[in-house]
Image (cartoon, helix red, strand yellow):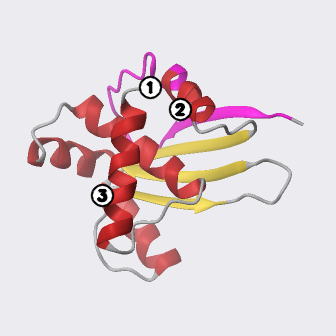
Amino acid sequence: MEHHQIIFESQIEHSLNLSGVEEWLIRVMAHLNVASYDITYVFMSDDDLLAVNKKYLNHDFYTDIITFDLSDGDVAVEGDIFISLERVKENAVTHSASFIHELKRVLVHGILHLVGFDDKTETLKAEMQNKEDELLRV
């Protein structure tokens, strides 16, 4: 049974304009041939994401994204993706990119983890970045 759901939640005040982003993510899922999905994005502060990183992954460092794969077989791709908007803003400046471009890169990065991509080695990281670049054009 096909299930298509993308949810955006926020634990912090922000003035994000996500107009068109959900439609783009739907195109991304179609491009990846994912027929059934249930993804929740949760936007939070650096400190809140650090707390998640420490509690669930035992990592004591800031990050822009943490992805939890919740797939249980009923839905092809299911997960919760936690994103630090502060870190995305910093990364956009570091990479001379617009905030929305960097946010879309992070949004799709989480999806790629859910469909099986990994970034634990430099080679895998490069493959994942190439796929991110491809999906940003979808």
Type of amino acid at the residue the image marks with label 2: Val
State which tag comes first along the sequence, 1 or 3.
3
Q: Are marks 3 and 2 in contact (CB under 8 Å)?
A: no
State which tag comes first along the sequence, 3 or 2.
2
Type of amino acid at the residue the image marks with label 3: Asp
Viewer-closest of 10 and 134: 134
Q: Nearer the viewer, mark 1 or mark 3?
A: 1
Circle 2 sits on which residue? 28
Q: Secondary structure at mark 1?
A: loop
Is residue 16 toward the left or the right of residue 34 in the image?
left
Type of amino acid at the residue the image marks with label 1: Val
Q: Secondary structure at mark 2?
A: helix
Q: Are marks 2 and 1 in contact (CB under 8 Å)?
A: yes
Q: Position of residue 113 (x, y in %)?
A: 52, 57
Residue drawn at the location 37% of the way across and 27% of the way down:
137
Q: Position of residue 115 (x, y in %)?
A: 60, 53
Q: Is 129 covered by the magenta stretch? A: no
What are the residue bounds of the magenta stretch?
2-23
Q: Label 3 crowding class (10 Å Cα cut-off): few <14, some 14-19, many 20+?
A: many
Circle 3 sits on which residue? 46
Circle 1 sits on which residue? 138
| Mark pair 1, 3: CA separation | 29 Å
Q: Is 18 covered by the magenta stretch? A: yes
Q: Label 1 crowding class (10 Å Cα cut-off): few <14, some 14-19, many 20+?
A: few
Q: Is residue 14 above or below residue 107?
A: above
Q: Secondary structure at mark 3?
A: helix
Quadrant of the rendering where the N terminus is positioned: top right
Is residue 112 toward the left or the right of residue 77 in the image?
left
Image quadrant assignment for residue 69: bottom right
